[in-house]
Image: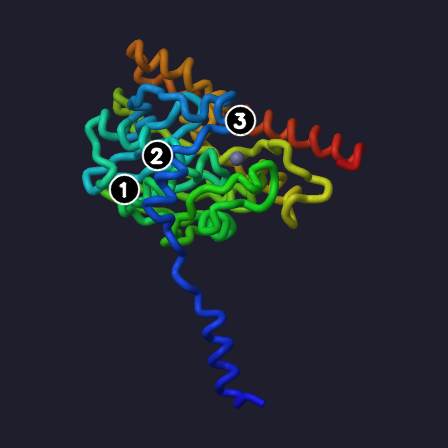
């Protein structure tokens, strides 16, 4: 029999967490060059879009179908979402086209660990050297590069190194700008929304809310795709209902009428993205769709 001390040492070695692995250059390059899925093509997930100023220090650097937001400060920037692996080079060139540098990104954030929002993070982490911040529940998915549940299971993306775990109500500050995390699970177990103050061109103060998403998106609610999923959705609808924000931003173009608002912004409307009540009505719409889908799945057994 092995001495107890030796056994404990073996146990400790087994548990000693090897630091999370950031994908290699070769893995990132291969994923960036991979053909797009049918979902990606239909959703214009990788179709180029003109980068532009949304309001204050918030910039859109995403594609036609999926968002990525750059929040600039004099001491470096925040970048929210990496879109697909194939989108990272576009995001980097969009940042450059606006006169900024990806190497000045200090914090890399993620709304949730699905390939269309997290796929490009590894490339962006490598290009920026930024601290990647994620929720505890989405962290293992980001580090594995595969969610393991729902329609995105098996759609692998280059793994990232999560440097810091953020909890509900915690914030990140940089250059006088503070972003606050709101854990809004449902769509994924670690779905994270963010809020921040934004100042309009007229000097008026606003609150921007970057919504993580609350669609069921073809996932099983019966039985739950992950334990506590139904409760998580309902709690999130209640949380978001209480949030006051008049600049509603989301991660798919159709959620927040990106094209239409961008056209108005381009035509000179500095407040094109200021729409009081839009977050509330979006939340109500998502909640109704969720309850309808849940009832359907309960009735049909899936
Ligand atoms: Zn998703």
Residue position for label 1? 127
**Looking at the image, is mark 1 or mark 2 earlier in the sequence?**
2
Circle 3 Cα neighbour tier, 10 Å, few/some/many (<14 / 14–19 / ≥20): few
Q: Position of residue 216 (x, y in %)?
A: 62, 33
Q: Residue furthest top?
A: 267
Nearest the viewer among 253 and 2 is 2
Real-space Cα separation, disc 2 to disc 3, in angstroms:
18 Å
Q: Position of residue 139 (x, y in %)?
A: 46, 51
The circle on residue 88 is 2
Q: Which residue is mark 3?
A: 39
Report the coloring of the rendering: rainbow
* Dot 1 and dot 2 residues touching (CB under 8 Å): yes
* Label whose residue precedes the other's in the sequence (3 or 1): 3
Rendering coords of residue 202 (x, y %)? 26, 20
Depth check: give the residue in front, 47 or 174: 47
Q: Quadrant of residue 287?
A: top right
- Residue at 31% x, 39% y is 78
- Give the class, few, some or many, for how many residues have Cα within 10 Å of label 1's Cα (few <14, many ≥20): some
Tell me if label 2 and label 3 are in contact, CB under 8 Å. no
| Secondary structure beneath label 2 | helix
Quarter of the picture holding the N terminus:
bottom right
Q: Is residue 246 visible?
A: no
Percent position of residue 185, x then y = 55, 43
Image point 42% across, 47% down: which residue? 159
Q: Quadrant of the C terminus?
A: top right
Kindly identify the residue that appears in the image at 29 percent across and 28 percent down: 199
**In the figure, residue 106 lies in which quadrant?**
top left
């Amino acid at each position: 029999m092995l001495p107890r001390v030796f056994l404990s040492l073996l146990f400790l070695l087994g548990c000693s967490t090897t630091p999370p692995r950031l994908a290699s250059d070769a893995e990132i390059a291969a994923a960036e060059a991979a053909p797009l899925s049918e979902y990606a093509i239909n959703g214009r997930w990788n179709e180029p879009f003109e980068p532009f100023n949304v309001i204050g220090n918030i910039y859109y650097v995403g594609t036609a179908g999926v968002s990525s937001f750059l929040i600039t400060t004099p001491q470096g920037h925040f970048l929210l979402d990496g879109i697909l692996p194939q989108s990272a080079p576009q995001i980097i060139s969009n940042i450059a086209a606006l006169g900024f540098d990806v190497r000045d990104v200090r914090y890399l954030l993620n709304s949730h660990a699905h390939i269309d929002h997290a796929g490009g993070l590894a490339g962006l982490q490598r290009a920026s050297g930024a601290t990647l911040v994620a929720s505890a529940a989405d962290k293992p998915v980001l580090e594995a590069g595969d969610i393991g549940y729902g329609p995105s299971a098996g759609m692998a993306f280059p793994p990232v190194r999560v440097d810091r775990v953020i909890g509900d109500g915690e914030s990140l500050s940089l250059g006088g700008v503070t972003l606050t995390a709101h854990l809004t699970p449902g769509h994924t177990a670690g779905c994270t929304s963010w809020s921040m103050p934004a100042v309009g061109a007229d000097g008026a103060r606003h609150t921007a809310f970057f919504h993580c998403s609350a669609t069921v998106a073809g996932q099983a609610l019966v039985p739950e795709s992950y334990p506590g999923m139904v409760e998580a959705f309902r709690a999130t609808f209640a949380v978001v209902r209480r949030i006051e924000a008049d600049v509603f931003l989301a991660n798919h173009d159709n959620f927040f009428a990106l094209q239409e608002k961008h056209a108005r912004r381009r035509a000179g409307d500095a407040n094109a993205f200021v729409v009081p009540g839009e977050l509330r009505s979006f939340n109500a719409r998502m909640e109704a769709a969720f309850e309808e889908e849940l009832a359907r799945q309960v009735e049909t057994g899936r």
